[in-house]
Image (tube, grey):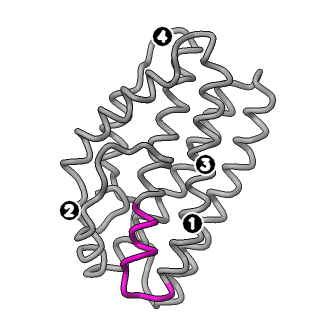
Amino acid sequence: MLGLKLETDPRWVNIVETNIEEILTDHAYCEQKAATNAISIMISYPYHTDLVEEMVKLAKEELSHFEMVHQKIKERGLNLGFERKDEYVGELYKFMRKGYRKEIVLIDRLLFGAMIEARSCERFKLLSEQINDEDLKVFYRDLMISEATHYTLFIGFARKYGSHVEDIDKRWQEWLTFEADLVKKFGKRETIHG
């Protein structure tokens, strides 16, 4: 369903298990950034009423996920810590077209969101199947389903608002190819995308 061209090496889970505090802190900030991204899209495209409505819902959901992750951190007697730089997302951001007409920029902003949600979904699935912590297995299974829904939401809006501008499936394949090459550099740290 996700179409990712390169799967995460399952040994990434072993890396994650060496530092649960780090993965949970990084995950919390990923949720915060996802909420911020939804708010930014809503502010940039206020004339697409349905997009605004869905981004409001998404921002709320992402913040509730932040709260859920923060609760897991507290339950374990750990600390949230400071925000981490997400180099994977930074590299994806560079692939986004900027400075074009608004329709083109919107397409890539939506595909950027879809890409992050797709990779997060894939990583959450891996955690839900392979991590030795039973509580986190269940936790990541539930979140994996949400990420898949978010991926679908972003792709759907890209098709709705971009199909008259360009071939969205062709552009999505370009994103997938770029991301497959990019992700080879990651999966070596105890972070969601690292």
Apparent side of residue 104 relative to residue 49 in the rendered image (left or right): left
What is the chief secondary structure element of the magenta stretch? Answer: helix
**Magenta stretch in the rendered image:** 123-135
How many other residues sit within 10 Å of disc 2, few (<14), some (14-19) or many (≥20)? some
Of the residues shown, which amino acid type is indicated by label 3?
A: His
For the residues marked 4 and 1, what is the alpha-carbon distance in whole angstroms? 34 Å
Apparent side of residue 126 relative to residue 135 in the rendered image (left or right): left
User: Which numbered marker is on residue 100?
Assistant: 4
Where does residue 158 sit, x and y in percent of width and height? 60, 27
Of the image marks 4 and 2, the number of the one nearer the N terminus: 4
Of the residues shown, which amino acid type is indicated by label 2?
A: Lys
Most extreme residue toward the front is 1
Q: Looking at the rendering, in which quadrant would you find the C terminus?
A: bottom left
- Of the two numbered discs 4 and 3 in the rendering, the one whose residue sits closer to the viewer: 3
Of the image marks 4 and 3, the number of the one nearer the N terminus: 4
Identify which residue is drawn at 32% across, 43% down: 5
Where does residue 27 sit, x and y in percent of width and height? 45, 64
For the residues marked 2 and 3, what is the alpha-carbon distance in whole angstroms? 25 Å
Q: Secondary structure at mark 3?
A: helix
For the residues marked 4 and 3, what is the alpha-carbon distance in whole angstroms? 25 Å
- Of the two numbered discs 4 and 2 in the rendering, the one whose residue sits closer to the viewer: 2
User: Which numbered marker is on residue 37?
Assistant: none
Of the image marks 1 and 2, the number of the one nearer the N terminus: 1
Of the image marks 2 and 3, the number of the one nearer the N terminus: 3
Of the residues shown, which amino acid type is indicated by label 1?
A: Leu
Question: Which residue has dot 1 on it?
Answer: 143
Q: Secondary structure at mark 4?
A: loop
Nearer to me, 17 or 2:
2
Q: Quadrant of residue 172?
A: top left
Q: Quadrant of residue 68?
A: bottom right
Question: Which residue has dot 2 on it?
Answer: 188
